[in-house]
Amino acid sequence: MISLSKKVKKETGKSHMGSSKISTRVSIRDKLLIKEVQELESNLPGTCRTYFPNPNELHRLEITITPDEGYWCGGKFKFLIEVPDEYNMVPPKVKCLTRLWHPNINEEGAICLSLLRQSSIDGLGWAPTRRLKDVVWGLNSLFTDLLNFEDPLNNEAAEHFSKDKEGFKSKVREFVHLYARR
């Protein structure tokens, strides 16, 4: 694995000669990510691991969450986080790569989490003061305390829970067994 100092050199080695706003934003994004990745790796929840498919691209990372409690305990769930050029003014794009039965994550991998929204009615949406660690902690919490059956993305899963909690639990276990074994 490439050391963080080599990642830094690769990320900041871009030319700053151009005056376009995109190259300036990319530069700002990359500078922020160098610091944030260091902070993230030292402050991860015990149930999370990071992986950089290309260590020279700090703006594209995978997070693996292995819940140690709750309905999804025993599963291993992968998420892809892509940080856009306009970061930190816009939130990262996040997709769940593991199929699961969850009220706040649909079967296509879309995620309902306030802090991933540019604007949110609950006031908890993205803000430039948020960081990657907030995203990771938020994703991790979708398996425990942020689990929300009242404002679902996957209405079928939420209805299943409200009508048949044991059936819901059984389907979650089935999905874990089929798609998310550790």
Image (tube, grey):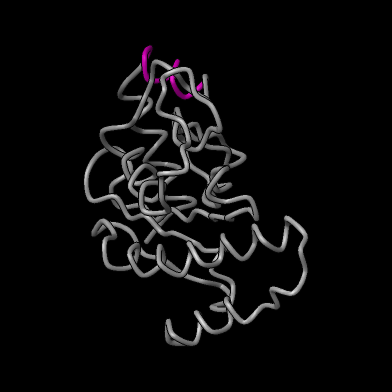
Expressed as whole percent of the image width and height from the top left, the position of residue 160 reads: 43, 19
Residue 136 on image: x %, y %: 38, 51
Q: Report x, y in % for residue 49.
A: 36, 64
- With respect to residue 87, does 124 lie above or below? above
**Whether residue 143 can be seen here:** yes
Determine whether, in the image, residue 48 is placed left or right of residue 12: left
Of residues 114 and 178, the one nearer the viewer is: 114
Report the side of 170 relative to 93 (left or right): left
| Residue 1 appears anywhere in the view | no
Give me the residue at 41% from left, 45% from top: 130
- Judging depth in this view, the residue of 100 and 5 nearest the camera is 5
Q: Residue at x 67, y 61 (%)?
A: 24
Q: Quadrant of the C terminus?
A: bottom left
Q: Position of residue 140 (x, y in %)?
A: 34, 46
Q: Residue 67 in magenta?
A: no
Q: State which quarter of the image contains the N terminus.
A: bottom left
Reply above or below: 138 against 114.
below
Eyeballing the image, is 97 above or below 119?
Answer: below
| Residue shown at the point (62%, 82%) measured from the top left | 13
- Magenta stretch, main secondary structure, is helix
Residue 157 belongs to magenta span: yes
Span colored in magenta? 156-163
Q: Nearer the viewer, residue 96 or 168?
A: 96
Q: Is residue 56 above or below residue 176?
A: below
Q: Residue drawn at (30%, 38%), measured in percent from left and top?
A: 71
